[in-house]
Image: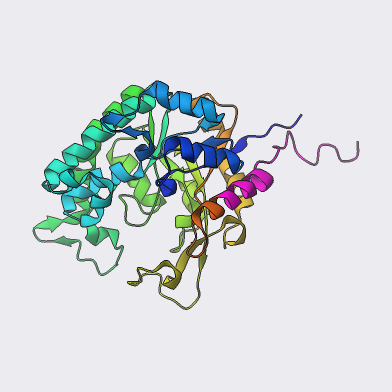
Amino acid sequence: MASICYHPSIEGAQHGAKSLAQFLDYAKKSGAAGAQPSNFMLQSADGFKSAKEIKDTFAKAKISLDGVSAHCPFWVHTTAWTGSPTVRPFIPPDVAKKSADEIEKWAEDYILRLLDLCAGLGVKIVPMFWGVAFGWELATGYPWGFWKGGDYDLLQEGKDRFVKKTAKIRKHAKSLGIYLAHEIHPGTAAMCADDFNLLVEICKGDKCLAVNADPSHCWEGESWETRFRKVGSRIYACHVKNFVIRCGLPLRFMAPNWPDRAMQFVDIPSGDLNMSRYVEMLVNVGYPQRYCQVMGKPTAPLVVEAESAYRDLDATSANGIAYVRDNLCFPLAAGSFEEGMGA
């Protein structure tokens, strides 16, 4: 009998208005077999919920704990040094008033405690992304960069900064057997496959540096296949998400309103990307096999992160879960289609 390697799952960060129990109830009713709550859903009034309380909530919902989405605290940790106000939505108001160094230290402590909780939950794969470790100048990617002068070298300084700032977190993750799955993403420490491979190189091949594949961020020249084949052996997590590019508009301009932008996230079935080819490629580079081995699960999650400039969030996500369940969780071929020919 042909085996199925995937199950439908959902990312929790966009659903932060819901409690953990409400999020899991919504996920289950929408057809998800698993869920990836955000770190915020695991918080209590005085820290984090206990591992037992979280496990019991998942057991009651009869849904699989597929990972913990920790993008926000990691973003804060590696971006605070820039003084950017973009970290403030993700930290307590009293912490936001502190210095950049104090905010960074708070984020580091938070992440270390979150990793301990993940270990207690049996979660070995943590989707996240590193912040602007190389500075906003390099994050623009603009070729007229003046990134190096007589008394400065922003690229080298960024390399040194990333290695130093992430050392304690990486060491702790490795001690717990946890993989930190960076979502290659505009404006982060690794915005393309080559950037990510550079992080691996400067960290001397650190095995905890993993990838959270998301094809919806491949809209500036590097195709999702080019990107994810370059980092294929380090893909331990994934998102299923789609976008459209509106022709004739600049990809980078100051348009805060999503419907005005050239690149827009859309419902999964109608976007520009072929999701079937994407999840087939993930099989080819070993993602589901790798995930199941590390997490001890029979199937790997296809984590829906459906967003839309126009459609209701819950409806968009539910539609995405149904699409994944009905179209992407297919039986794997047990052999070549040629084997039965002429029998």
The extreme left residue here reads 151
230 left or right of 207 in image: right
308 left or right of 32 in image: left
Q: Is residue 330 magenta?
A: yes
The extreme bottom residue here reads 248
Q: Quadrant of the C terminus?
A: top right
- x and y, in percent, of residue 325 in the image: 64, 43
- Above or below, 50 against 17 in this view is above
Could you tell me which residue is drawn at 80 percent across and 41 percent down?
A: 338
- x and y, in percent, of residue 235 in the image: 47, 39
Q: Is residue 321 magenta?
A: yes
Q: Is residue 202 visible?
A: yes
- Total marks drawn? 0
Could you tell me which residue is drawn at 40 percent across and 47 percent down?
A: 17
- x and y, in percent, of residue 18 in the image: 43, 43
Q: Quadrant of the N terminus?
A: top right
- x and y, in percent, of residue 243 in the image: 51, 61
The quadrant where residue 83 appears: bottom left
Q: Is residue 164 visible?
A: no
Could you tell me which residue is drawn at 71 percent across and 37 percent down?
A: 331
Which of these two is toward me, 49 or 72? 49
- Above or below, 135 against 43 in this view is below
- Above or below, 172 against 255 in this view is above
Q: Tell me where the magenta segment starts and ends, as one range.
A: 318-343
- Above or below, 234 against 309 in this view is above
